[in-house]
Amino acid sequence: MHTICLKDNWTLTVLGKNVYDIPETPIETKVPSTVYGTLLEKGLIPDPFYRDNELDALKLMENDFAYETEIVIGEEDRKADRLFLHFDGIDTIADVYLNGEKIGSADNMNRVWEYDITDLVAGDAADTVYQVKVILHSPTKFIAEEDTKCPVGGSSDAMPGFPHIRKAACMYGWDWGPRLPDAGLFREASVLAVKTARLAQVFVGQEHHVTGKTVHGNVVDSVRLTADAEIEWMPGVTNGNVKIVMTVTSPDGKTVLTAESGSIDPLTHSAPAKNLTGLTCELRSNHVQASLTVENPELWWPNGYGAQALYQVKVALVAEDTLDTWEKKMGLRTITVNTDPMEDEVYDEHMTGQAPDYDDGDNMVMTNGEKKVIITDKAAKTVKGRNFAYEINGLQIFAMGADYIPEDNILTRQTRERTDLLLKSAQEANFNSLRIWGGGYFLDDFFYDVCDERGLLIWHDFMFACASYELSDHFEENISTEIRQNVRRLRSHASIALWCGNNEMETQYEMLAWPKSKKQYYDYIHLYEYIIPKIVKEEDPEKFYWPSSPSSGGNYENSNAENVGDTHYWGVWHGSEPFTAYRSHHYRFLSEFGFQSFPSLQTVKRFTEDGDRNIFSRVMEMHQRNTAANGKILNYISQTYLYPKNFDELLYCSQLLQADAIRYGVEHFRRFRGTCMGAVVWQLNDIWPVASWASVDYYGNWKALQYAEKKMFAPILLSCEEHGEIDQKPFVNTLPHPIDVSADLHVANETGEPIVGTVKWSLRRPDSSVVKEGTFEVNAPAYGGQWMPHLDFNGQDPLEVHLTYELVVDGNVVSSGSTLFCAPKHYHFADPKLSVSVDGDTVTVTAENFAKSVSVETENGVLRLDDNFVDMEAGTKTFRILPTADFTAKGTGVSGAYRVRSVYETAER
């Protein structure tokens, strides 16, 4: 098969009168291309992300657009049996023409679209020029017209009618994104010249020969790889023998294994088939197999559990020459989700909210050795249930990571370099998991390649989110083809952990929130609990399918339960609950929880003017899409910090809040490994510069949360469950009020070896002087944890002391932290008198007293350090400058003077 790439010599035309008065004349462009991206590149529109430019940019999408190019099909390509005009991505409602004749349509950005042009060019001279035209119809008018015919419900943050189009839902707006539904030929276009046959699909199955099991999972001495190839014969081909040849190259490139099938011909083996677009057509098809065994395999592991060994697997379709090839890097691993019933466990007094037994009075009994504690909270009876844990190579892991959303509304700005920087940020912050959220689109292969290489497991939603759908025959066929194509394309990636039907739809249907008809209610079950799992079983039988997120397994049965399946918890943030509320829950797998913050001042400057820099200004509220959320941030600040002295300090305080909120949750969930096996934070990244739940801002800069996640997701974590004003919150009219000042330290061990070491702790005053100190010996089991003896500090003033702690193993500090016993606004800080100096790539901070959340920054805001936003005692602390993750900067990206600050400096004192 020969591919003629159609990259150059395209034009884009804005059809009709438009908001920017762009003339209806062709504009030169290249494909991949989008309307916004091309017009920005040519300087014909202002940046839609600046101030409130989004409003005019949205109006532009009321127009239609035309992409045009000319192609020549050479003499050699004309000898092919079939010629196809092929598009890897059309966004979205389109008609396709060749020399003025309509040859097809498109209505799904998540599909490959292919049109047979063989007969249209037959008999023409080799130098004949053909005109290709793609008319893209208005994506806003389309959904409005369709919604008048059949109303559907969905997220109120998006434009009404968005479920009617198979396009990234978030392009129509979300509670973190603008309404900018771009359009274009956003992936490659080509002409395919196919001789005899091609590979319709290839599935490489893995059969692991397990000889035993250790604490680190299965012992595997060999893996049998079987390539099952479906051959698509071209119409009219009646003779010719073909076979497949499979080649497997070891990760180091030194070992090459081969296997081949027997020869087959088009007459002996024939059956109805589906082509690449999934439509039944005049093709004959058959499957052939080739198998080989990899001895002593190098297994693939998620980040933090082992190496990401990748074998190069190539399957060639061979006649006299090679007709077609399929090639992937594959990790050898088994992967599933363990949903076994929970066994009775020994619960201690830390585990409020759950217990395995009841006494005769129907009270809960929690045991701690010989000690028994009676818990009378009847609402806490959520003891048993089912496990929900990724199981890789026989090892159940604790999933740690975040939810991923599209990186840009303007798809052509989502470059490989930018994506790699973002995923590198995830890996460096000790993520082992991502969840690809269902309101976006299926990503380019490069994204999944990088996840394979960096060990990032993917929970992959299908592209349905917060919406109701009514199935027609066409819609069902359209989405079935979409799912089949993408499962086939992505199933060989080591990183794909599970397929999930949708985002948050079962819970909304369960509450009857979105369906507009009984049919939509019934169609939900048909789509997510019959059609999609059937396709997944056919196309990717080795993967786990889950009907929705959150879900308890489907059928509208208590879909957001705490003790079964995955859960979305939003009591903290949407429910305005305190951070300590996390500690009253013991979820099995938390796939969404989050807290908002503003980006840094340097990022805010890139989309505002001076007069916009107030969190309640028109522009700042345009760049905050969650209702009344800027006020919510300010409310949480009022509970935690003194009123910030300026706009910049308010932004900084919001990031500290966000980091602390998520830390409370993650540390708690990791302390109960075995009950909870996943903490996936909403969200990793932004789609535009905005106040949001992201830990990495639109430009790639780390917020305080991303630095905090690097610590809380580390394989070894020492954490503290403190008690004081922070969790008892005495009302001022009740003061003086007795406060329990105490702490419980815990070591979480997500490694395959026991952790033997020493916990050192010290209770200190604001000037860092020690009130009392001590040590505990640690022997935390592999993939387990250990509580330290209770620390009782009653009698101490919670406003005058703080606790520092560190875990020392083999003379090295592997985890550390500190905690206050009151809100920072009430703590009696002494002026730390911070100073900063820089020598090469080393930054040194000096403090004269205890300083909380010390942050080092530069004027341009793109400084990246190995650690930041840290607590420090009196003395010095050093940091290392790293290459920035800001995709607009190069190298370290550092410019301007350095400055340092902490919580003390945020308010007038």
Image (tube, helix red, strand yellow):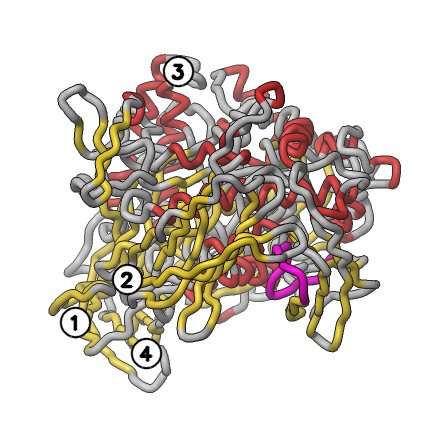
Indicate yes or no whether the magenta region holds residue 191: no
The answer, for residue 200, to whether it is visible in the render is no
Check if mark 3's residue and mark 2's residue have beta carbons within 8 Å: no
Q: Secondary structure at mark 1?
A: loop
Residue 248, picture quadrant = bottom left
380 is higher (above) or lower (below) than 819: above
Q: Which image quadrant: the C terminus?
A: top right
Find disc 2 in the rendering and name its residue: 782
Between 719 and 445, the one lying in front of the other is 719
What residue is at 48 percent from the left and 44 percent from the top? 793
Magenta range: 861-875
Q: Residues within 10 Å of mark 3 (few under 14, many from 20)?
A: few
Q: CA distance from mark 3 to mark 2?
A: 45 Å
Q: Nearer the viewer, mark 2 or mark 4?
A: 2
Which mark's residue is nearer the viewer, 3 or 1? Answer: 3
Q: Earlier in the sequence, mark 1 or mark 4?
A: 4
- Characterize the local packing of mark 2: few (<14), some (14-19) or many (20 or more) Cα atoms within 10 angstroms: some
Q: Residue at x 39, y 17 (%)?
A: 511
Residue 735 in the image, given as x and y percentages of width and height: 59, 24
Report how far apart the C-alphas of labels 2 and 4 lie in the structure.
33 Å
Instruction: Name the one closer to the observer, 762 or 533.
Output: 762
Q: Amino acid at mark 1?
A: Gly
Q: Are marks 3 and 4 in contact (CB under 8 Å)?
A: no
Q: Mark 1 sits on what residue?
A: 262
User: Which residue has dot 4 on it?
Assistant: 249
State the image coordinates of residue 851 (x, y, percent, origin top left): 67, 54
Indicate which disc, 3 or 2, sits on the residue closer to the N terminus: 3
346 up-or-down from 432: above or below: above
Say which residue appears at 36% left-offset and 83% top-offset.
253
Which of the two labelled residues, at mark 1 and mark 2, occupies the earlier sequence position?
1
